[in-house]
Image (cartoon, rainbow, N blue to C red):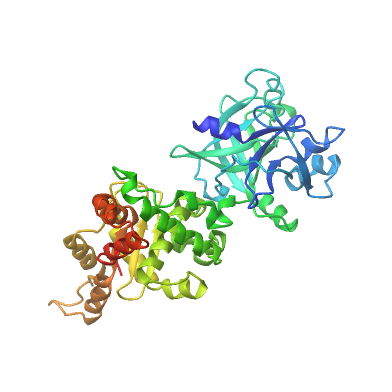
Amino acid sequence: MTVSEIIHSYCVKVNNGSGVLVNAMSHEYSYVLTAAHVIIEKQGGIIVHDHQDNPITVLDVFPQCLPSLEQIKSEPQLYDFAILKVNFQEHIAQKFLPASELRDQSPLTLVGFPETERNSSDPIKDYTGHKVSVANQLIIMSLDGIPGKTTIQGMSGGGVYHIKDGTPFLTGIEFQMDGTKLEQQYGRVQCHCLAKFEKLINESSSAPMIPPYLDCFSNVRDRIFSFNVIDPSNVSKLKTELEQAADYLIQQGLTPPYKLIKKYHSDLLLNPKELNDLTTIELWTAYLEFIVISVLIDESLSADDIYLKNLERRRRLIYTSENANWIRSLEELLKKARILLDANGTLIVSSPQTTAKVLPDNFRLDKVINDITVVPNKGPFPIIDSVSSSESKILASYKLTHLEGLRNTCVVDIEDEYLNEQGNGESSQLLRKKLSEIIS
């Protein structure tokens, strides 16, 4: 799907206005974020249709006590937002970006159903523009082409997206033009930040506004251990054994992703500023693989909280959505390892790089370690720094590897070896042997 097709698939009509579908951490319902005035202005209930004009059932409304039109008109920034709880929409995979992370002049796209077009063959319209400001949980967006109020009438409640590297991130909900007088209402709109909706959901004691796959690892289980081999039958037994191990760990109560996010937060990421990566399905697919191979290497019978606590100073997974060669980041990885791991610990990198080497070259590691531990000379002659020497030994003790590199080296490159290990448990034990030769 194109970016436009993705964001259009989340766009809905709410009465005479617009709304945007988002994930709830539940398989029982989803949410529609919108502006409160589009719910109140129309008499006779709330009517919602998806982008293909199919009706969507409304189950509930937040807040329970909707503001009056007088309150909304007097203080729209305080009152003009609402959430509809609707029947579960399986296709939603909405990604979010806090408005606070938008840079100056960040490009934005407003999507909705303008009144003048909603009965046409092409009812959804995109208006591009850029961020003017973010303050007090309010985004001011400037629209290209300087459209007037009558042009975008009906787009209230529509989603505002920031497109980054071909991926759309929902960052706000539009609710009115920016300007008190009619002659001022051209080309600028006001949008609520997502934090307002998150607070409303929390106050309503409903499921958080995050993807359902963060609720349980069972929702990513079908994505794990996709070996790109020549003949899949060579590794079919191995894949089955690994998937069965994952099923067992999940059934035993493996800590769900959303709790791990709360526990580890930015420690899961190579770049701690890319917090939107915490909710990507790729991270949690990789993390489930990481847990399964850790249990295999350690010959553990479970991955309960005690096991995870003992594991976290010995072996960690770090994720990045960047496709760059992971070895470019050796310095950042070593510094991360120094914070997260005890001596002799292992740091496993997960990234989209499909051609990743399993290990960095020793000479590159030595150079980076030397750069990290070098101490400026404070005298005319070189001084042996015992602190620097001990630090070098700790950094040199770490094992740095890449998850894709492990997959290729330990399985893909030797797939024929697994053909001869089709007995019960033999395939996974061969993988354990190969992994243990590289990491501990």
Residue 272 visible:
no
Q: Position of residue 416 (x, y in %)?
A: 25, 50
**How many numbered discs sit on the rendered protein?**
0
Q: Is residue 354 left or right of residue 133?
A: left
**Is 16 in front, or is 92?**
92
Please name the residue shown 41% across and 58% down the image: 242
Give the farthest residue toward the left: 381
- Measured as percent of width and height from the top left, residue 107 is found at 51, 36
Q: Position of residue 185 (x, y in %)?
A: 69, 29
Between 58 and 391, the one lying in front of the other is: 58
Q: Relative to residue 102, is residue 334 depicted above or below?
A: below
The residue shown at (72%, 28%) is 154
Q: Nearer the viewer, residue 330 or 437?
A: 437
Indicate left or right for 260 with 202 as reference.
Answer: left
Give 215 or 353, whichever is nearer the viewer.
215
Res 188 → quadrant: top right
Taking the view exactly as shown, the residue that stands out farthest to the top is: 120
